[in-house]
Amino acid sequence: MMTLAQPVRMISGRYAPCAIEDATHVTLNIPGPAGRLTLPVMLKGRREGTGCWTWNGSTTAPTLRPSVLNTGHAHRCHTWITDGCAQYLDDSSHDLRGRTVPLGALEDMP
C-alpha cells in the first residue's frame, strides 16, 4: 500500500519518522499549490486550544480535522483531508477548486 501520511515527531529541531502512537506531527503530499505539509496532530483528546489537527492514525487513508488552509503569495488552497483524498473547497483559488483528488504518495516527493 502507498504511504500517504508519515507520522513524525520533533527530535533535536528536526522531524524524524516515528511510530503512529508517538507522532506529534504528520507529513502529507497534498496535490496542488500546498504540496508537502507537516502538520501538528493528535490522535485522541480534545483539540480545542491546541493548534493541532485530529488525525485518524492511518498512513494509507488519512483523515484530518478541521480543514487545512494554506495560503501563499499567489494561491489559497483550502481542503478537507478525508480517507486519503483532498476535497478542495470552493474558496480555493486554483484549478483543483471543487474537486476531490487522492493525496500524493510521499515516495513521490523529494
Image (cartoon, grey):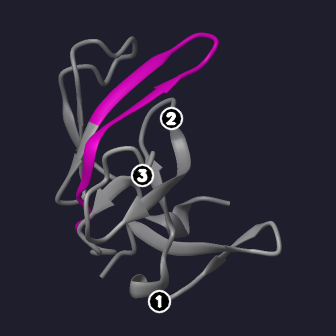
- Decide: is 93 above or below 84: above
Q: Nearer the viewer, residue 87 or 22?
A: 22
Tell me the tag on residue 67: none
Quadrant in the picture for the N terminus: bottom left
**Between tags 3 and 1, which lies in front?**
3
Tell me the tag on residue 52: 3
What residue is shown at x 35% (from left), y 75% (from top)?
Answer: 2
The kind of residue tagged 1 is Ala
What residue is shown at x 59% (from left), y 59% (from top)?
Answer: 109
- Judging by the rendered image, the residue that carries numbered circle 1 is 19
Tell me the tag on residue 34: 2
Packing grade of label 3 (10 A; few <14, some 14-19, many >=20) is some
Q: CA distance from mark 3 to mark 1?
A: 18 Å
Which portion, as a residue range, is magenta?
A: 61-79
Q: Position of residue 107 (x, y in %)?
A: 53, 70
Q: Nearer the viewer, residue 82 or 109?
A: 82
Q: Earlier in the sequence, mark 3 or mark 2?
A: 2
Q: Earlier in the sequence, mark 3 or mark 1?
A: 1
- Decide: is 58 above or below 26: below
- Decide: is 74 above or below 28: above
